[in-house]
């Protein structure tokens, strides 16, 4: 009996992982920054919470819509390329076979063998062979707009809920330091989880996401304080 070996590669996670990390990261940073900006303007606790909840809802919808439109554009481009390739295969299959063979030659395969491989692959699935080796479109990298949109909206909401929870549990006079510190901890954990899930080094992603989060929150708090004094 032939044994089937199924390998699980980390690159298969790249689509949903990118959307999930982006969503959670944006949820924490944007909501925490909004909360700190409003709180720095000496707003009431209820106003801070209202701003945070509004930021969560608006941000989640924005992330979902933006991700769906962006990934849909990628999907449309892929489908257009596949349609053009399908026409070319119907109109001149011999040219397409030689084109595929030359791709393999460029990768180091001997010319005669490359032509045999191209012939056999096209006999089984001509469009699939050209999509994979000529266009770079594969099952792993195929655009999935709905999946990306849902992942972004859900993870944004989870990320945004973290600084909101900190507002609820912190005393009014400690809202700014606790939200700042707690959000940075959440960002560091997110960077570690994202790097671990993707099989990458943990240190650099953690430092990167924490630094930019601190920068965004600090800048927003400073502007909020200035505007609060001005009005």
Image (cartoon, helix red, strand yellow):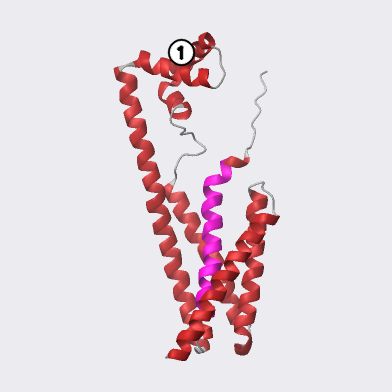
Quarter of the image for residue 187 reads bottom right
Relative to 174, residue 104 above or below: above
Q: Which residue is located at x 61 percent, y 77 percent?
A: 179
User: Residue 215: x and y, percent?
Assistant: 57, 70
**The N terminus appears in which quarter of the rendering?**
top right
Secondary structure character of the magenta stretch overall = helix
Q: Is residue 155 visible?
A: no
Q: Is residue 217 visible?
A: yes
**The C terminus appears in which quarter of the rendering?**
bottom left
Q: How many marks?
A: 1
Quarter of the image for residue 207 reads bottom right
User: Residue 120: x and y, percent?
Assistant: 48, 14
Q: Which residue is located at x 64 percent, y 31 percent?
A: 6
Relative to 173, residue 131 above or below: above
- Depth check: give the residue in front, 114 or 87: 114
User: Residue 158: x and y, percent?
Assistant: 55, 65
Relative to 39, residue 66 above or below: above
Relative to 107, residue 156 above or below: below
Magenta stretch in the rendered image: 12-36
Instruction: Decide whether residue 30 is among the magenta residues.
Output: yes
Where disc 1 sits, the SS reads: helix
Label 1: few (<14), some (14–19) or many (≥20) C-alpha neighbours in 10 Å: some
According to the picture, the residue beneath numbered tag 1 turns out to be: 119
User: Residue 146: x and y, percent?
Assistant: 43, 50
Instruction: Decide whether residue 134 is among the magenta residues.
Output: no
Spot the residue most to the top: 112
- Depth check: give the residue in front, 44 or 206: 206
Q: Which residue is located at x 58 percent, y 65 percent?
A: 212
């Amino acid at each position: 009996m032939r044994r089937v070996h199924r390998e699980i590669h980390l690159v298969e996670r790249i689509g949903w992982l990118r959307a999930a990390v982006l969503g959670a990261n944006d949820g924490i940073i944007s909501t925490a920054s909004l909360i700190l900006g409003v709180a720095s303007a000496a707003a009431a606790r209820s106003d801070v919470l209202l701003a945070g909840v509004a930021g969560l809802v608006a941000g989640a919808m924005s992330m979902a819509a933006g991700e769906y439109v962006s990934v849909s554009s990628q999907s449309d481009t892929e489908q257009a390329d596949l349609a053009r390739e399908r026409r070319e295969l119907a109109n001149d299959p011999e040219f397409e076979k030689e084109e595929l063979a030359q791709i393999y030659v460029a990768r180091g395969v001997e010319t005669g063998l490359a032509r045999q491989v191209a012939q056999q692959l096209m006999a089984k699935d001509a469009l699939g062979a050209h999509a994979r080796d000529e266009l770079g479109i594969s099952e792993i990298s195929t655009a999935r707009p709905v999946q990306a949109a849902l992942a972004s909206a859900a993870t944004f909401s989870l990320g945004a809920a973290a600084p909101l929870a900190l507002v609820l549990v912190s005393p009014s006079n400690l809202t700014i330091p606790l939200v700042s510190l707690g959000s940075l901890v959440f960002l560091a954990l997110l960077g570690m989880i994202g790097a671990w899930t993707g099989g990458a080094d943990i240190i650099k992603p953690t430092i990167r996401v924490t630094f930019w989060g601190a920068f965004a929150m600090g800048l927003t708090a400073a502007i909020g304080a200035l505007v609060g004094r001005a009005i």
